[in-house]
Amino acid sequence: MLEVVIPGLISSIQDLGRKNQMHIGVSHSGALDQLSFHLANRLVENPANTPALEIIMPPAIFTIHKDCWIALTGSFCSASLDNKVIWFGRRTQAKKGQTLKIGPIPRGLCCYLAISGGFTAPSLMNSSATDIKAGFGGHTKEGSTLKKGDHLAFGESYCKINQDVGIKLPFWDNTLRVITSAEYSQFTPKSQQSFFEQDWIVANSSNRMGFRLQGKPLNRIERTDILSQGVVRGVIQVPPNGQPIILAAEAQTTGGYPRIGTIIQADLWKLGQAGINQTLKFKPCSIDEAKEALMRQQAYLDRVEYILQSTR
Amino acid sequence: MVITNKELQVSIYPVSEGSVTLASTCSVSLPVQKKIWWLAAKLREQEKYIDIVPGMNNLTVIFDPIAHDIEKIMSELLILWKNTDYIDNAHSLQREITISVNYGGHFGPDIEEVASLCKMSVTQLIECHSQGTYTVFFIGFQPGFAYLGGLEACIATPRRAEPRLEVPAGSIGIGGSQTGIYPKVSPGGWQLIGRTDAILFDPYREQPSLLLPGDTLRFAVNQVSSC
């Protein structure tokens, strides 16, 4: 079992989220940075969708009460086991009684802590993901974030792990590729240009529902209403005040604000690591380029699998 | 990559590399929404969609962009939409749900204000609201929150000037030309006229949402309180 000594600002059990529930208003929820979540699990030989801990804005401190292997991924920060340095992107053996210290994060937003065997979080509506906004799921089933004193059970290793191994983690940068929306032409040419040229800043009103950006407001030529329609993670809405909101894991399932574009799936993990006051830039991208980027990301994951296989 | 078909009065466009929206170019109406529900049901028979999300006059589908070609999906949607001309116009999910309401008093703190704005008595307001037949166009905003069509124009009332910080779960409100039920405690700007004990959303239930797109909803008067 893992005991929470210091939880971190917003820490919660996450997985890849709840699918096929959006028609009843339930967001996918799940990890903000699905790439790092996936890598952490694979490093400790957990199946891809195993519940792991998402720690938004450490510092966080845990006491480990059972021998296990752990892996940390996401925004880099200092981490230690009994004050001995441990590395990101590497699996490390942990012994009963050891103290795990993580963070704070100098640049970024969150880390993922995966533990061999996975956190034994109950499944609700086919997922263990914590939906903080909706108030269900996670380790308490009520959408709670971690607090001091919480005990998180974890399972037995899925297979025998013989040696530690490290991988090269993906490189983060602040440029997010965007597929322009069907409503893009409704924005003034000046706003279209400004959207791609300016440095946007992540506001501190951002949360797991959406990343709110501050910058020069975007204007539309015509202010017609948009009827409520289904939206996905990465959609960039522009409300009347002209300040974009990028939808994240717990965004509402339908939205009525006009959209300027959507961040490509291969870059969503980068959005998930955008901390408060982070500068972000956008770059136009076609659907074909977006698919290519996703396939390249899959190729990277295949290489990781290959490395892990060779250590068994 | 937008498909606009004037004859079929539809527009189909990508939202991302892995999602597409089909939107009717007609005004919002029950006949068009029925086509949206039919299309959603038809698409569920295939197993390639991660999510199928009805909206107001539109439908959004989400899929794996590597496994499926977006242009193929858009063409398929157009073909299916063409078929909606031939569906039985009375086709819908045929479920009828009755929700029992406690009108007025502390359950509906705005009821007298709404009655006054609509130039009728509280009794007439309750009669009008509870005798209506409502249709769940789609669910959005919150788990289990139904966007309802069918509110009589005579009881349409503007939202409150200042939203409440906390609206109790089960509260029934009127906001503009819409009526609806708040499934969960939340901030809200609608005029509250009553409350129901019915649980609109329960993640532990086999079907967590009490209401589904296509349902017919009626309100039944359980009790009327005064302030």
Image: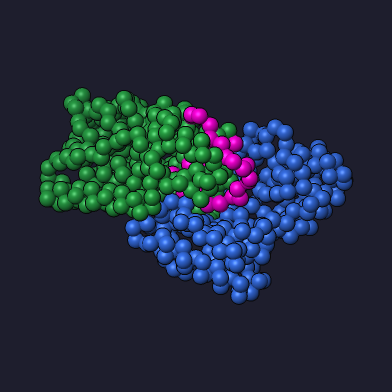
A218 in the magenta segment = yes
The secondary structure that most of the magenta stretch takes on is loop
Closer to the camera in the image, A43 or B53: B53
**Which residue is drawn at the image coordinates 73% and 45% (left, top)?**
B176
A204 over A304 or under it: above or below: above
Closer to the camera in the image, A67 or A40: A40
**Which residue is drawn at the image coordinates 35% and 54% (left, top)?**
A288
Outermost residue toward the front in this view: A189
Q: Is residue B163 left or right of residue A172?
A: right
Q: Which residues are magenta?
A: A214-240
Q: Colour of chain B?
A: blue
B146 in the magenta segment = no
Quarter where residue A224 is shown: top right
Whether residue B36 is visible here, answered yes or no, is no
Q: Is residue B170 left or right of residue B193?
A: left
**Which residue is drawn at the image coordinates 12% and 45% (left, top)?**
A162
Quarter where residue B163 is shown: top right
Closer to the camera in the image, A68 or A290: A290
Percent coordinates x, y for residue B211 in the rendering: 61, 57
B96 over A212 or under it: above or below: below
B47 over A105 or under it: above or below: below
- The C terminus of chain B, quarter of image: top right
Q: Is residue B132 left or right of residue B95?
A: right
Q: Is residue B128 left or right of residue B192?
A: right
Which coloring applies here? by chain
Q: Colour of chain A?
A: green
**Which residue is drawn at the image coordinates 26% and 34% (left, top)?**
A64
Percent coordinates x, y for residue B190 in the rendering: 70, 41
Percent coordinates x, y for residue B109 in the rendering: 76, 38
Whether residue A162 is visible here, answered yes or no, is yes
Percent coordinates x, y for residue B46 in the rendering: 44, 68
